[in-house]
Each structure stands twice: as structure tokens, then as C-alpha cells.
Image: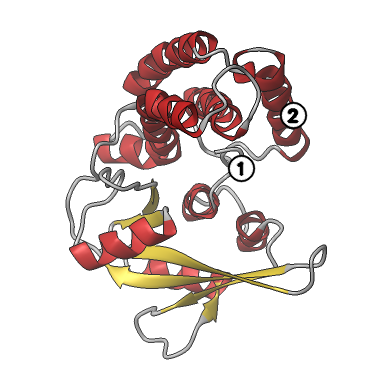
Amino acid sequence: MLSEPRAGRLAAWGNALLAGLVSPDDAVLAIVGEDTVHRVQGLPGESAPVGLTLALGRLRTLGVTGLRLALPAPGHPLGLSGPPEFNARALDAEQAVVCYGASFGLVPDVYEAGPEGDVHVEVVWHVLPVREAPPADVPSLGEAERELAEALREATEVLTRLDVAGSGPVAEAAVDAYRARAERGREVLAPGYPPRAVRVLELAQRVGTLIVVATESGHGGAVSAFEMGARREALRPVERTARRAQVAAYNSVVEERERGVR
């Protein structure tokens, strides 16, 4: 959770494009990010992969009015609605985009090539049918914000109890580095999102940073394999809360539209 998921960028900037808030070129540039190229395969009427600009335009003509993020994990189909084939592909990728207004979903395949230090990344988004049903386990922004505040307290308490350096200056340095990157590139969401969604996503990223530092750091008292496993298990509910909040933030503009807020 230290970086924005590719499905998150596609959902956020795709929503901004569908709302007429950004140009196709700006949306595609933001979605691709530091990757070399993104293509979309399996679009109705297309026998070969096409570029993102054409794909987003075609999805609009097919009735898509919004894009939702899914961040599933084993035993937790967060943001998914089926069928099983799509859910399985999304779970393998650990992320997906589910269309609103038409029964399609997109799952990324990521390909890397080139020598170390000069790796080129290409992404192919596979368009698959999805079931028209509410996404699984996605909270409202208000619920996510309340849950995150409690999760941050729990994470800090757990890390302190386990004598993990992630509860102190090391974690704070990692959080500050993430914030600096976000400020430089304004990576948090896209035009059209409410300020509360940005706030929730930033807090979810903060909690995620603490979890990564705790599970990847060898510092502190819990250094054995058993204790590292106990550390991960103790933080599992916190990680789940952070993922749910991240999805709620990305999906907020679609949820508002569905409720008739906009």
C-alpha cells in the first residue's frame, strides 16, 4: 500500500475522464504513470488489444458511467461481485476495476522486460464479464474514516507491544517519504473527488505504511520467524481495514452518483 495500485489509477482518472473533468490525453498519462504502455484486450468489437484512449471511449459508448476499484485478498473478495471466473482473475492480480453502468470488469496483467535498472513495464487490461450486484464489503466514506482512526490506534499499540521499530521514528520517516512523493506528484486520487475521499485515502496509506514497515523490518524485539508471523497476524485486521478504506475512497464518486448526490 506504499504506492497507488494500477487499478486505482485507472478507476480514479477514468472517472475524471467520464465526468468530463480531464482530457483523454491527461487521463491516459496519469493512468500509465511510470509504466511504458497500457493496452486493453477483450473489448467487444475488437479482435486485438487497443490503447487506453480508444478503450475508455469504447467503454463509454457501451454504457459505462463510472469505474470502481476492487482490492481482493484470500478470503476477502473486497469490491468484487462475481462471477467466480472474474473473481479468481482479480484475486490473482490482487486488484481489478469493475465498471458501473455496464457489466464489464478489467484485470491487469503486468509484464516486465529489460536489464536491472532499465526495466520496461507493459500492462494488458483484460475485459471480462461481471455480475450486476453490489460490490462486496465496501464501506461508506464515513464508516471508513471512523474505522481507520481506530485501526491507526490499534496498529500503534500492537507495534509498541511487540517492540517493533515501526511504531516509532522508522515508521514516521516512511510515512513522511510517502507524503513527500504524493505532494510532488499529487498522486492522491483525481479531479472530481471530494476532499473527504482524499483524507480517507491518505490515512489508509499511512496505516498501510505502518503495516509494511512492521512486517518487513527486522528491527525491534520480535525477530524470530514465529514472532514475525505473530506480528503479521496481529496486524491482519488493521490491514483489512486499510484496504476497505482505500476502496471506499476510490469508489466514492460512483457511490455518490448512485445515491443521487451529484
**Residue at x 55% of width, y 50% of height:** 9
Dot 1 or dot 2, earlier in sequence? 1
Nearest the eye: 85 or 26? 85
**Residue at x 37% of width, y 14% of height:** 146
Nearest the eye: 131 or 159? 159
Task: From this view, report whether residue 227 is shown above or below residue 90.
Answer: above
Residue 168: x percent and y percent? 66, 12
Identify the element where label 1 is drawn: loop
Q: How many residues crowd around disc 1 within 10 Å: few (fewer than 14), some, or many (20 or more)?
A: few
Label 1: which residue? 3
Residue type (three-letter) at the residue carrying disc 2: Ala
**Residue at x 65% of width, y 21% of height:** 171
Residue 260 quadrant: top left
Q: Residue furthest bottom?
A: 47
Residue type (three-letter) at the residue carrying disc 1: Ser
Task: From this view, report whether residue 3 is shown above or below residue 199.
Answer: below
Task: Name the quadrant of the N terminus.
Answer: top right
Nearest the eye: 92 or 57? 92
Q: Give me the disc on residue 126.
A: none
Check if mark 1's residue and mark 2's residue have beta carbons within 8 Å.
no
Q: CA distance from mark 1 to mark 2?
A: 11 Å
Q: Residue furthest right?
A: 117
**Residue at x 50% of width, y 14% of height:** 162
Left or right of 204? Residue 237 is: left
Label 2: which residue? 177
Residue 197: x percent and y percent? 48, 28
Identify the element where label 2 is drawn: helix
Residue 178: x percent and y percent? 69, 31
Task: Name the quadrant of the C terminus.
Answer: top left
Q: How many residues crowd around disc 2 within 10 Å: few (fewer than 14), some, or many (20 or more)?
A: few
